[in-house]
Image (cartoon, coloured by chain):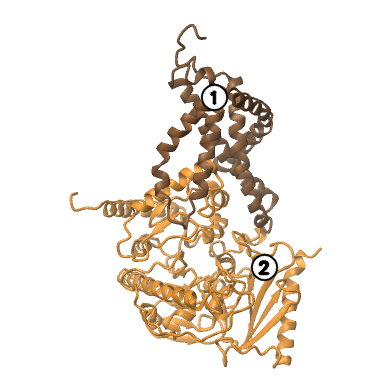
Chain colours: A brown, B orange
Amino acid sequence: MAGRNLSMIEKIPKLEDIAPVYAVIVMMIYPWTLSRFFWKLSSWILFASVGDLAALFAYMVVVNLLESIVVLLVPILMSIILPQKWFYDRFRTRSISLVLFGLGYIIYLDKKLYADSPFPLTLVRWIPMAVIVILVLVFLVDRVGFFRKVLDELANRLTVFLYISIPISMVSLLVILIRNVF
Amino acid sequence: MSGLSRRSFLKLAGAATSAVLLPRLVSRLDSNLKQDASFPNIIIILFDAMSARNLSVYGYPRPTTSNLEHFAERATVYHSHSAGGNYTIPGTASLLTGTYPWTHRAINYGGQVKSSMVENNIFHALGKGYHRLAFGQNVWAQFILTQFMADIDTFLPSGTFGELDYLLSRHFPKDQNMAARALDDFVFKMEREPASMVFGALHRMLYFRDSNKLNPDGYPRGLPENVNYPLYFRLEDVFDGLASLLQSLPSPFFTYFHLFPPHAPYRTSDKFYSKFLDRLIPVKKPVHRLGDHLSNLVVRTARRSYDEYIASLDWEFGRLLNAMEKAGIFENSYVVITSDHGEIFERGEKAHATVLLYDPVVHVPLLVSAPGQQVRRDVYAPTHAVDVLPTLLQLAGKPVPSACEGRLLPGLGGVEDMERSHFVVEAKNSPAFQPFKRATIAMQKGNYKLIYYTGYEPEDTFELYDLNADIEELDDLYPAQPAIARRMKEELLDSLLDANKPYMK
């Protein structure tokens, strides 16, 4: 691949490279919401039927599905737009570290964004700087072989969870479509 | 456009859209309905969390409700009217189904009327002879209303007439109830960190960006907002919207306006800001062992803000009343003013997130003006939220559902019964479809009120008050009046047992 410049279409990563990245995204996004679902469950089970709980779960999973796809699009777009050597050639490890740092930062933002407290405007103004720092970290981490290996191994192991999350997400999407279209 | 601010432009655009769309929507929805204009219009205006104890129309020393007093001159004023519960879900469900919370089972935060009771709602009972409109500005009231959507001709989302609306459920018209509970009340709820990691952060940032752009002019404590949900509104816009909406409806119509104010946060308009810097010192009461133990200063400050907010609301209500009179709507309608629950500022408690059922949190206003009524009538007999449904159905010439637990209001077909028993139920921490494990139940019979606390402490406890002699509920007669206490206790426990029976294994 090093011999010629790839076209933009050719720089779309292969499915076997996308899957582990998506697995990392799923394993960060779904459990975040799922843990809150279980936290709310104690109050829901006071009055909601199993059918109601299933519908609530379906809405939650569809939101997670959509946001995981949006997050996945970021490294894919970077792979397409940036020079091949910068991202496409190291798509898997750079994407995984991008996802970990990026979502980690969003978790930090989430923790700060309380409704009743003064809105952390300063924090929001620093978002561009945070993005730059994250990108620098992504490229630095990828230079360390040990980290590369850890990220790669981690992603490979997480891929198995896609066999659970994707079918559940598809069924949930179908449920929401049926409830809202028919 | 040089003199037109962004807010003015948005208001103008919103008003123009409403003016164009609402009549069309109404007439389109109405085209298939057979309506008989000889039936009276019925307008329920419910002010959320409005305690009768803080209204000057009921004798409160601060002049909070001069317009309501004007309204009362041509209305029946019920002086001992109780809500079904002490927060929105049970209170609203009791009003709209004519049943006690232990019957409709909407008792939990975010809870719902049990499915077998849904058809018992007032919209269904009124039938298609009326154009039925519902507007729940409180999201939890909207939870209940979305259960009745099949019986509602025009359903207005909570953000209607608002300044800013980031609720998502309105985009799911076919599944609004579940979408509201899943998205607005969970995934994107404005409390703690969002349950959606990425979209939640984005949703919140966009909301705060837009809310920062709002012009709070006229509201020194900030624009009124719907606590925990992303909705801002201006009182004047809401009431202007209601006035023009009422003029566009085909007769006969039934409207249920569940307005969020004066629910906390108490955002008074500048006309009434610091109006009550008086030396009002409420009766000192002991802090209750199950209360929040807030300081006197916190409670007194909250009370003052609440009173100022009520005065702001009353001022807007006066404008609505004028508009209704000018349009000839008032003379042709039953106008019902009430609330779903009260608000308490005593015993170390503020607002209504409490297990206590003292008078301020359950005693709500009820004023009913009949078409053409010219004189005031006062009713002192105990009445209850469950009485509103049968009374209105009877006035509309419709049969009352057999499951209804209320009776006709005195002065509107019913008679005063000083010995009648009624109940207020607080059981938010009990499973809806099991016998109550933890609850507070208040039973009023004549002058006496018995309060039963179960499940909070190892031993169940009772309190008994004579509301005629001791409206402040300071002197617990439970030990001193054993005969009355025993009789009322037996009746309360028997009624609770009956209510629990369907859920016993």
Mark 1 residue element: loop
- Whether residue A119 is situated above or below residue B476 in the rendered picture: above
Q: Which mark is residue A142?
A: 1
Q: Is residue B212 above or below residue B489?
A: above
At mark 2, the secondary structure is helix
Residue found at x 64% / y 32%: A166
Q: Residue at x 67, y 68 (%)?
A: B103
Say above or below: B479 vs B293.
below
Same chain assignment for discs 1 and 2: no
* Observer able to see residue A177: no
Q: Is B117 or B162 nearer to us in this picture?
A: B162
Q: Nearer the viewer, residue B156 or B466?
A: B466
Percent x, y of residue B109: 60, 61
Front-lying residue, B505 or B275: B275
* Distance from the alpha carbon under mark 1 to that under mark 2: 63 Å
Residue B379 x %, y %: 51, 86
How many other residues sit within 10 Å of disc 1, few (<14), some (14-19) or many (≥20)? some
Amino acid type, callout 2? Thr
Residue underneath mark 2: B103
Classify A118 as above or below B306: above
In the image: residue B225, left or right of residue A28: left
Residue B366: x %, y % from top left: 49, 77
Chain of the residue under label 1: A
Q: Amino acid at mark 1?
A: Asp
